[in-house]
Image (cartoon, coloured by chain):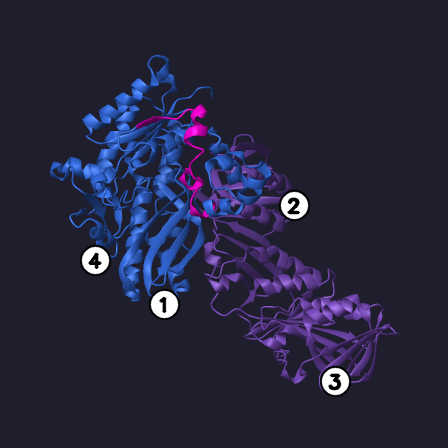
């Protein structure tokens, strides 16, 4: 792994930039993407640099933002547009190398080591930035480094339209003076913990004694110390994003809800969304988890596991609703969520048959028998059951954290597995 | 109340009744054990409202005096505490005396405990069981009947009646059935003098498991009495009451196939070991699936395949193989439990297709029948 060249590419104010491309009259104006305040989703998801100049920040309420910047343009999110732009972005990156690892809808690592034998790395990254800007009209920042951690750190250093090279020898000068909270992978909680042993800068973290950090943060502590020293041996893995572990949806209710019919309705919708996304990914799972947040922000998580992996709306809803009825204390509900986890590819799913519902479970027995006969006669794989084309769901990617936006690539890149 | 007793006998009796005592009871007095002393002997009673166990220790046994009763009476003592105390007493002679109120003194050697007891009249009465609907069977037979069926009861409460074993009497035969809806165990026993007027009861699996622990592996007869709500198992010195489960047990007789397309006679032990090996690569979250496939020349293949772990294949020869070729997947756990219940000898496995229930039984008869539903793979 000597001398890798890893690039982290971060689209600047992605949603806002896409909106400005879509409606050029918004260019140069302070705009923000936010949910509907009437439905209590009035939180700024992202905003343009022009808005940032006024102090507008992500996660502010629309109300707070308008105070700082009365002329702020508020736009509702249009995920279809962002998905489309994201798709073009990743396609462009793939023209350079197969080693593209999407991190989220607007962020990616690429490994260009092999390209650097013929061309200089800086020449390549400049070209990538220029092409994204001229072909997609979108600004982005790039970090160039020998590993993922440094690349990610570097891309953060100059925004917008920056290119930052971070070599290992630069660490002491560029990274170490910063407070630990600025380090990727250190959040508020970790920073507070580190403060208890007197660590406030990245330099202190880099030089902390191994056993001390291990005692405080365990294996993650050792990892952070290594990163602070510029060590990170994670590879760029184009498939890592496809390892879906769970599929879940949640929603904040327009008002604190106590009506059980209304809650049932919402639970049904959430189950339908989850089912649709599972279907699009050809997954099924054995654990259903529900989230309940009440008006006082008390969060409750409850889950149930079943024998046979499930993927359809009715089954998900039945379990989710039973869990809800069992654990809901009738206090007003602010947010509801449903997640299916322990997921596996539907082709690996097994179904333990039951004595009392056998007839229902094996309705299709004659077809299966016929197929077996044909296989015996013509060899394995001679017939296959209706190969279903991957389903394009209408409920996809609705936050930048969701990885569903990749399902499009999924379809292009991976051949349908035999059923 | 005042008596002297041999510590080891008291401990043996306590050991049995403690099996019925639960710390999770909602009735406070049931956290205690009731002690009744008469001139005949000592009764100990423990209960969790579902199961009630009473043991009897006679004053005298085979000419040996076990208890010396000075004054008769009753008291309820905290079960866990009393049991621990008796276990740790310094000598084999124990004197228990209830003085003023419910204050109880336990003396052994130079050790003396003062325990605060509870009023025995508050303790629930034993269920009343009429003597007419009774039958009996040897303890060792009863134990194997339990062992061969109870493992198949449902563990989830989604259909409470399936957490019990269904006992019914039909033409001088006792038929015991347990199923969790994925597999079924059935045991038939010919017994003499079976009462005719009992149709069907469901005994909680948990009760049978506890009973199995208490019964000794002897040929001594166990009297079994049934009422509409309770069952009583009675040996010389133990009464074991269990509440019955309410609700209709599903009719399972029609669910057992009558005609079969593939018959395999195989050494049960060899198959059990092969399945056990194959199950090492089966995943619990995928129903522990192993595959079973008939090959030519009296051979079957057992295999398991988990894409992210690896795979295993093993061929075993069978005594006899007739009928259609077959590939079937099933839970290794269910198969192993069924084979253990039939116990090692040659078994016949009869299939009716990849997605249909199949049965296992001994080559001699169908006194023990195990039915398993396969796992569908896609």
Q: How far apart are the alpha carbons under marks 2 and 3? A: 52 Å
Say few, some or many: other residues with alpha carbon within 10 Å of mark 1 (under 14 / 14 to 19 / 20 or more): few
Measuring 47% from the left and 21% from the top, which residue is drawn there? A1
Q: Which mark is residue B344?
A: 2
Stretch of the chain drawn in magenta: A163-190
Which residue is disc 4 drawn over?
A38
Identify the residue position indicated by label 3 in the image.
Answer: B73
Regarding mark 2 in the picture, which secondary structure is present there? loop
Pointer 2: residues within 10 angstroms few (<14), some, or many (20+)?
some
Q: Are marks 2 and 4 in contact (CB under 8 Å)?
A: no
Alpha carbon separation for disc pair 2 and 4: 70 Å
Residue B193: quadrant of the picture: bottom right
Task: Give me the C-alpha separation between circle 4 and circle 3.
Answer: 75 Å
In the image, residue A50 above or below residue B104: above
Dots 1 and 4 on the same chain: yes
**Chain assigned blue:** A
Q: Dot 3, crowdedness within 10 Å: few (<14), some or many (≥20)? A: some
Vertical relation: B17 (above or below) B282: below
Can residue A383 be seen?
no
């Amino acid at each position: 792994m000597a001398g890798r060249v890893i690039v982290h590419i971060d689209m600047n104010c992605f949603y806002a930039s896409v909106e400005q491309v879509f409606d050029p009259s918004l260019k140069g104006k302070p705009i923000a993407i936010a949910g509907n305040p009437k439905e209590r989703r009035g939180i700024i998801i992202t905003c343009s640099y022009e808005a940032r100049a006024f102090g507008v920040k992500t996660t502010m309420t629309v109300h707070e933002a308008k105070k700082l910047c009365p002329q702020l343009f508020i736009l509702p999110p249009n995920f279809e547009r962002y998905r489309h732009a994201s798709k073009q972005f990743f396609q462009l990156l793939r023209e350079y190398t197969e080693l593209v690892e999407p991190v989220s809808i607007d962020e990616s690592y690429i490994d260009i080591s092999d390209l650097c034998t013929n061309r200089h790395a800086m020449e390549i990254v400049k070209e990538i930035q220029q092409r994204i800007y001229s072909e997609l009209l979108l600004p982005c920042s790039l970090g160039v480094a020998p590993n993922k951690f440094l690349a990610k750190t570097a891309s953060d250093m100059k925004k917008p339209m920056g290119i930052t090279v971070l070599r290992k020898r630069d660490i002491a000068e560029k990274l170490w003076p910063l407070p630990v909270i600025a380090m990727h992978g250190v959040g508020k909680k970790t920073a507070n913990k580190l403060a208890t042993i007197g660590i406030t800068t990245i330099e202190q973290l880099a030089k902390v004694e191994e056993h001390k950090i291990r005692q405080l943060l365990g294996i993650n502590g050792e990892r952070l110390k290594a990163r602070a020293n510029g060590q990170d041996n994670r590879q760029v893995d184009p498939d890592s994003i496809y390892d879906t572990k769970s599929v879940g949806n949640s929603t904040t209710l327009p008002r604190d809800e106590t009506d059980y019919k209304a809650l049932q309705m919402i639970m049904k919708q959430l189950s339908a969304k989850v089912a649709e996304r599972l279907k699009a990914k050809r997954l099924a799972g054995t654990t259903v988890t529900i989230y309940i947040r009440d008006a006082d922000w008390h969060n409750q998580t409850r889950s149930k596991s079943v024998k046979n992996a499930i993927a359809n709306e009715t089954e998900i809803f039945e379990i989710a609703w039973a869990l809800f009825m069992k654990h809901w204390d009738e206090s007003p509900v602010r947010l509801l969520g449903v997640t299916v986890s322990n997921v596996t590819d539907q082709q690996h799913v097994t179904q333990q048959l039951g004595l009392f519902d056998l007839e229902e479970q094996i309705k299709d027995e004659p077809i299966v028998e016929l197929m077996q006969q044909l296989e015996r006669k013509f060899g394995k794989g001679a017939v296959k059951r209706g190969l279903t084309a991957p389903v394009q769901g209408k409920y996809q990617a609705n936050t930048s954290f969701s990885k569903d936006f990749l399902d499009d690539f999924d379809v292009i890149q991976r051949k349908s597995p035999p059923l | 109340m005042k008596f002297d007793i041999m510590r080891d006998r008291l401990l043996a009796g306590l050991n049995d009744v403690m099996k019925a005592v639960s710390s999770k009871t909602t009735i406070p007095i049931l956290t205690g054990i009731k002690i009744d002393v008469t001139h005949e002997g000592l009764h100990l009673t423990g209960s969790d409202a579902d199961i009630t166990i009473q043991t009897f220790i006679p004053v005298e046994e085979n000419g040996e005096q076990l208890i010396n009763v000075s004054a008769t009476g009753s008291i309820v003592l905290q079960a866990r505490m009393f049991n621990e105390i008796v276990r740790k007493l310094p000598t084999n002679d124990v004197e228990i005396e209830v003085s003023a109120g419910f204050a109880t003194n336990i003396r052994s050697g130079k050790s003396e405990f003062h325990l605060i007891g509870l009023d025995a009249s508050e303790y629930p009465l034993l269920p009343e069981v009429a003597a007419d609907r009774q039958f009996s069977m040897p303890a060792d037979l009863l134990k194997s009947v339990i062992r061969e069926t109870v493992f198949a009861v449902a563990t989830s409460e989604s259909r409470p009646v399936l957490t019990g074993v269904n006992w019914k009497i039909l033409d001088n035969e006792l038929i015991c059935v347990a199923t969790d809806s994925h597999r079924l165990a059935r045991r038939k026993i010919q017994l003499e003098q079976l009462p005719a007027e009992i149709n069907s009861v469901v005994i909680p699996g948990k009760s049978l498991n506890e009973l199995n622990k208490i019964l000794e592996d002897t040929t001594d007869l166990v009297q079994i009495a049934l009422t509409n709500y309770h069952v009583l198992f009675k040996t010389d010195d133990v009464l074991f009451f269990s509440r019955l489960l309410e609700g209709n047990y599903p009719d399972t007789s029609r669910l057992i196939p009558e005609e079969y397309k593939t018959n395999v006679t195989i050494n049960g032990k060899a198959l059990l070991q092969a399945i056990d090996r194959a199950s090492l690569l089966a995943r619990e979250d995928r129903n522990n699936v192993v595959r079973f496939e008939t090959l030519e020349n009296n051979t079957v293949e057992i295999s398991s395949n988990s894409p992210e772990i690896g795979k295993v294949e093993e061929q075993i020869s069978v005594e006899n193989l007739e009928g259609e070729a077959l590939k079937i997947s099933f839970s290794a756990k269910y198969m192993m439990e069924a084979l253990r219940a039939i116990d090692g000898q040659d078994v016949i496995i009869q299939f009716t297709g990849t997605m249909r229930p199949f049965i296992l039984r001994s080559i001699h008869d169908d006194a023990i029948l195990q039915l398993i539903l396969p796992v569908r793979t896609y």
